[in-house]
């Protein structure tokens, strides 16, 4: 009998975990991704703030699966699924037939219906996004060095991060350290106190998914770094030169979006029910209602456990779901998924973090060391682990940011900056 053909779409945390967990199963795997690399998104903010280089946090998918004989990798974009004919439709290649399909296509930014903000307030989801943000931040500093008009200079030195979740907190802390500590030594007119970093959150507090005590500690730690926290304040307008927060206009050239995500269009491809964030509502075994041969996992799935809790869009959920679906395929039976929650982590600046392990809550330098260890451990490949570890040690000792490169167009211009 022919081996089952398992098609996995997306080589992020979920898809890659599924492919690896099927290494010894009697199946043929085709893993399709529109990018040639697996990306460790939790460290993207360090690329955006010049702490790490893109290659430190990404690895070619082909290299990762080099030794796995039952897997092949295709570089293409999936644009649809023909459920009845059991084929995935590709943007460039011929349709691919499947016996089992795993959709793990992740999520993208959501501007809550204000898509026109995207151009002024980029988010970070890919390497390109992160290097574009790095360019924006570094260019603002370069322009501020030579700007003589005090109001324009203040706008250039004002950085606004929207969204007080882990990514926003990490991003704001890293920008504050970059602008106030690392670069001020290299510039002649930028002193540690002339930059302003704003962290804006519409909800009542930072890190809403963490217990209130840790959220308070994170707020104190980030304020000590020089970040101004504006919580309970919705953003009502963003232009290329300013942001309106609760009716007050703040001039700035650099706004970064860390506020919302929406799932990839898997639910549309399958014409299946989705939640408000576009995540496909899967059954308890992660399959699509009516289609037991199709599983949806990670950020693109909405899974509600028997206690009524909907799982968050984080890497451990995606990985555990990937391994779970692989187990079901290998055993050829349906099994209910149960998430093992090992806790929440967020880092603030160069030596503080908060960790929520349920009953055990940690903050400060020890939590930061645990955060570093966990992130190095989960990075793909020994090379990346070694490089990131060495980079962090170097920046910790010297405050240096090794990847302070402005890349992109030859004649760089800031948004709206025509002067
Ligand atoms: C900036 C940032 C920081 C984060 N920090 C943390 C953190 O600290 N801790 C944590 O647990 N989680 C964090 N997350 C969330 C975590 O990264 C996601 O939950 C996780 O990546 C979800 O895994 P996934 O497999 O569902 O999707 P992804 O890892 O996003 O992978 C999706 C893959 O599908 C591919 N793809 C998408 N559409 C198509 C298509 N049409 N055709 C072909 N390929 C396609 C993409 O190229 C990508 O490789 C962070 C996310 C971001 C953006």
Image (cartoon, rainbow, N blue to C red):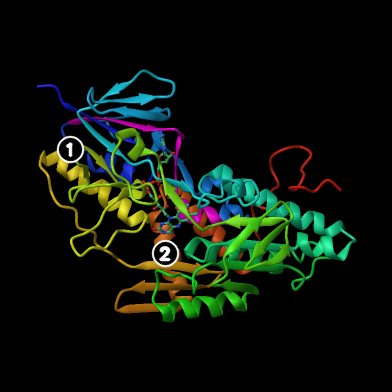
The residue singled out by tag 2 in the image is: 373
Q: Is residue 276 above or below residue 71?
A: below
Residue 198 falls within the magenta-colored stretch: no
Element assignment for label 2: helix
Which residue corresponds to the image point at 22% horizontal and 25% vertical from the top-left? Answer: 84
Label 2 beta carbon within 8 A of ligand 1:
no
Q: Residues within 10 Å of mark 2 (few under 14, many from 20)?
A: few
* Image position of 413 (left or right of 159): right
Horizontal and vertical percent position of residue 365: 48, 76
Measured Cα–Cα span from mark 1 to mark 2 = 42 Å
Q: Quadrant of the N terminus?
A: top left
Which residue corresponds to the image point at 72% horizontal and 65% vertical from the top-left? Answer: 250
Residue 32 falls within the magenta-colored stretch: yes
In the image, 218 versus 79, the foreground residue is 79
Q: Residues within 10 Å of mark 1 (few under 14, many from 20)?
A: few
Q: Is residue 42 above or below residue 75?
A: below
State the extent of the magenta-drawn residues as a range: 27-45
The residue singled out by tag 1 in the image is: 290
Residue 67 in view: no
Q: How many marks?
A: 2
* Image position of 63 (left or right of 410): left
Which residue corresponds to the image point at 17% horizontal and 37% vertical from the top-left? Answer: 290
Element assignment for label 1: loop
């Amino acid at each position: 009998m022919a081996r089952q053909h398992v098609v996995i779409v997306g080589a992020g945390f979920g898809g890659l975990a599924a492919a690896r967990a099927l290494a010894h199963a009697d199946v043929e795997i085709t893993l399709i991704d529109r990018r040639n690399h697996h990306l460790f998104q939790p460290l993207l903010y360090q690329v955006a703030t010049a702490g790490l280089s893109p290659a430190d946090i990404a690895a070619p998918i082909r290299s990762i699966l080099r030794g796995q004989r039952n897997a092949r990798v295709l570089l293409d974009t999936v644009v649809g699924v023909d459920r009845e004919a059991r084929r995935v439709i590709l943007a460039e290649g011929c349709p691919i037939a499947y016996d089992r399909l795993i959709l793990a296509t992740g999520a993208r930014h959501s501007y809550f219906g204000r898509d026109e903000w995207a151009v002024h307030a980029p988010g970070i989801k890919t390497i390109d996004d992160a290097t574009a943000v790095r360019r924006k931040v570094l260019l603002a500093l370069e322009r501020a060095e030579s700007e003589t008009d005090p109001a324009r200079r203040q706008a250039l030195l004002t950085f606004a991060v929207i969204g007080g979740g882990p990514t926003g907190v990490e991003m704001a802390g890293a920008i504050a350290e970059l602008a106030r500590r690392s670069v001020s030594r290299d510039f002649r007119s930028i002193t540690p106190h002339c930059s302003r970093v704003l962290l804006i959150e519409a909800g009542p507090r930072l890190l809403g998914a963490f217990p209130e005590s840790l959220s308070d500690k994170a707020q104190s730690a980030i304020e000590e770094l020089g970040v101004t926290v504006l919580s309970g304040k919705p953003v009502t307008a963003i232009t290329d030169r300013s942001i309106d927060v609760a009716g007050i206009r703040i001039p700035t050239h650099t706004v970064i979006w860390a506020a919302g995500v929406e799932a990839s269009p898997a639910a549309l491809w399958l014409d299946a029910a989705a939640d408000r964030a576009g995540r496909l509502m899967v059954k308890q075994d992660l399959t699509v209602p009516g289609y037991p041969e199709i599983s949806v996992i990670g950020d693109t799935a909405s899974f509600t456990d028997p206690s009524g809790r909907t799982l968050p869009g984080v890497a451990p959920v995606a990985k555990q779901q990937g391994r779970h679906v692989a187990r079901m395929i290998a055993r050829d039976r349906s099994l209910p998924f149960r998430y093992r929650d090992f806790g929440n982590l967020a880092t603030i600046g160069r030596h503080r973090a908060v960790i929520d392990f349920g009953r055990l809550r940690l903050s400060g330098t020890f939590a930061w060391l645990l955060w570093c260890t966990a992130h190095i451990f989960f990075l793909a490949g020994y090379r990346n682990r070694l490089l990131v570890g060495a980079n962090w040690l170097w920046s910790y000792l010297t405050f240096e940011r090794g990847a302070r490169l402005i890349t992109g167009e030859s004649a760089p211009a800031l948004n709206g900056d025509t002067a």
